[in-house]
Amino acid sequence: MPPLLSSFRRLVPLLLAALSARRIAVEAALVTEDLQLVWHDEFNGGSVDWDKWVVDEGDGCDVDLCDWGNGEKQYYLSENAAVANGVLAITAKKEDFSSRFYTSSKVTTKNKFSFRYGRAEARLRLPPGGQGLWPAFWMMPQDNAYGKWAASGEIDIFESRNNFTESVNNLAYGNAFPNNSNHNGECFLDVPDGTLEEYHVYAVEWDADEMVWFMDDEETCRIDDWFSTDVKTGEALQKPAPFDQDFYLVLNMVSGDWEIASGEVCLGALCTNEVQVFDGFAVSVEGGVLRVTAASDATASGTDGGIVMAATSGLLHTMGMCG
Ligand SMILES: *[C@@H]1O[C@H](CO)[C@@H](O)[C@H](O)[C@H]1NC(C)=O
Ligand SMILES: *[C@@H]1O[C@H](CO)[C@@H](O)[C@H](O)[C@H]1NC(C)=O
């Protein structure tokens, strides 16, 4: 266990008071004043808990979404997601697989856990460098109630691309592609080189009226205008649609020469042929009105402070490795 985590656990009772104060200050408008832990994964086992997670395998072509709709170059495999030492590691590799030249992983809680309203958070760290990588912590609609992307919405809790000098929060909504809307450009937080390679807690707090994003305790984004369209009928829908439905969690790392027009392809900082990229993710989701679809994690069990720890940090430390 990383030393930081051990000492952090000892500090939990002290941090609780500070945490309560912050919540009162920033969450007056949100439904999440009375948070209850409804789902968490602290990655304490010896492998990914497949009762909680599922992998979006492949390159998307078998679900009629080649390159996953993003020009993604990699092939997602379950073996590129691994748990050890309390860390979920998503490893991007430069390796040939099924006519692709990169592999990586994308784990989701689709059909296993989804929720509406509350807080989702993860404590995570990105690998050094980042050129060619696009890691993301986000949410997608469980049921696509209003139709195909992005009429049913997408909630981007945290993502960063290439050199990792920006922390990005965003929403997609409005209508089916290409007539969708988003808040691109509004919530790009410039950070000094190396910032995202350190551990931070990324969170969104969400209710029917508003979404607020945080990096650690700092608010980084606040959005309260969105709408949708029922793709089948063409009917215009006002807020809270489409974000009035259950969403599931996604953690992935797009890899390859993403958005690099030409030239050398690098993964990570060192431009080596293969980079072991360990991204640790800990995710906890809390809220007053959450629905738990997977009974296995309906309660906050916890030897490590349970609710308090999860609410505070999302619990998790990761190792970054490159080379
Ligand atoms: C990102 O970093 C690589 C390697 O240091 C550098 O060659 C590249 O120009 C950088 N790209 C941007 C957009 O800053
Ligand atoms: C997008 O909007 C245009 C203009 O209103 C319309 O002609 C087109 O059919 C729409 N596309 C989709 C996929 O809804």
Image (cartoon, rainbow, N blue to C red):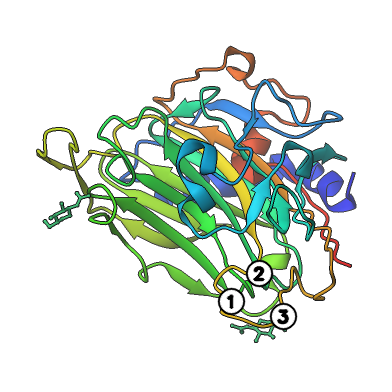
Sort mark 3 into few (<14), some (14-19) or many (20+) by Cα contacts within 10 Å.
few
Residue type, label 2: Gly
Q: Which mark is residue 238?
A: none
Quadrant of image for the N terminus? top right
Name the residue tied to disc 3. 264
Q: CA distance from mark 2 to mark 3?
A: 10 Å
> Circle 3 — which element?
loop
- Is 84 rendered above or below residue 272? above
Q: Are marks 1 and 2 in contact (CB under 8 Å)?
A: yes
Is residue 205 found left or right of 225 in the rendered image?
A: right
Quadrant of image for the C terminus? bottom right
Residue type, label 3: Glu
x and y, in percent, of residue 126 in the image: 70, 61
Relative depth, front residue between 274 and 310: 274
x and y, in percent, of residue 193 in the image: 67, 79
Q: Which mark is residue 132?
A: 2
Is residue 228 found left or right of 48 in the rendered image?
A: left
Is residue 37 found left or right of 75 in the rendered image?
A: left
Q: Is mark 3 within 8 Å of ligand 1?
A: no
Name the residue tied to disc 1. 260
Q: Are marks 1 and 3 in contact (CB under 8 Å)?
A: no
Image point 22% across, 54% down: which residue? Answer: 225
Q: Quadrant of residue 305?
A: top right
Closest to the camera, between mark 1 and mark 2, is: 1
x and y, in percent, of residue 86 in the image: 82, 39
x and y, in percent, of residue 248 in the image: 48, 33
